[in-house]
Image: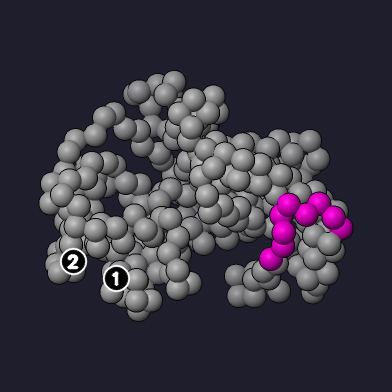
Amino acid sequence: MDCKENPCWKKADLDDPSKDLIEGVNEEAMEGHEEEEWCFILFPISNTMLQVEVIEPAVKGTLNVLKASVEAKIKRFVFVSSGAAVGLNPSWPKDRVMDETCWSDKEYCRTTKNWYCLSKTEAESEALEFGKRTGLDVVSVCPTLILGPLLQSTLNSSSLVLVKLLKEGYETVENKLRMIVDVRDVAEALLLAYEKPEVEGRYICTAYIIRAQEFVDKVKSIYPNYKYPQNFTEPGEERVLTSEKLQKLGWSYRPLEETFVDSVESYQKAGILN
C-alpha cells in the first residue's frame, strides 16, 4: 500500500503508557502493511507555553510512542521536530550558518524561559537517543515557520504570524528574519524521510529567508486592503538555518508567492480575516 496515497492516521493519548497505544499502532497502523514498508510520523502538539505543560508531555509522549513503535516492529520512525530545536544557540560560531549539527542550548532555553524551544530540543534529542539505544531507525525533520493552506478551521501558531500582520494594524514591528516553508513542502520532506533508504539523523526543513518588511510588502502587493504594519525597527543579531542536507535528498519547494496566496485564501475561506 502506498503511504502517500493511503496514509493511516492514529490519534492517541501520548501520556498513556498502557498497551492500548501499542495495540492501536499494531491493529490499525500495521493492518495491510508489510513490516519493512512502515514508518511512524509523530506530530507532538502543545497549546500552552507553561513549562510543566510543554516539556513533560513532549518528552514523555514521544518516548511512549517510540516504545509502542518498537513493540509494533515499525522499521522507521519519522519525528516532526522544529527549527526551534536548532536555532537557539548563542555559542554557535557567528560566521557559520546553522546546520543539523547545531542544537538549541538547553540551559540557555531554561535561563531565558523559552519552554517551547526547550521542549522541542528535549523531545527530539530523546527520540534520536532512543533510536541509538534500541536500533529503531529514528529520523527527525525540523521545519521552520510553516505557512500554507489550512486543513482545519482554527488557527495554529505559525499561521497566526501572518494573520496578525494582515489584521492587527501594528504601528511598529521588528524587521526580523522569517524562515518560511510551505506545509505541503513539509509533507513532501516527510515522505522523503520515510521513503529514502539513505536517510539518517536530522533534516532542517526551510525554504525562504525573508525580512518582515519584505514579507509584508510581498503580501501587500497581492492583497493591498488589509491593516499592515506601518513601520519597522531593526532587530539585533540573527542567525539563519540551512536545508542543504534535505535538498540533497531531492527535496524542493514551491514559489513563496504561491504559499502567500494559498495561505490568505484559506484564511478568507475559513472566515479568519473577517
Q: Mark 1 points at which residue?
A: 273
Location of residue 68 by image quarter: bottom right
Residue 70 in the image: x percent, y percent?
Answer: 82, 51
> Do the CB atoms of the residues marked 2 and 1 lie less than 8 Å apart?
yes
Q: Which residue carries the number 2 mark? A: 226
Residue depicted at 45% across the width and 32% down the height: 88
Quadrant that contains the N terminus = bottom right
C-alpha span from label 2 to label 1: 9 Å
Q: Quadrant of residue 122?
A: top right
Question: Under tag 2, what secondary structure?
Answer: loop
Residue 184 location (% of width, % of height)? 45, 64
Q: In this view, does 230 lie to the left or right of 115?
A: left
What secondary structure characterizes most of the magenta part? Answer: loop
Q: Which residue is drawn at 17% across and 38% down?
A: 233
Foreground residue among 110 and 265: 110
Q: Horizontally, is 146 left or right of 130 in the view?
A: left
Q: Which segment did they paint magenta?
A: 11-19
Residue 53 is tagged as: none
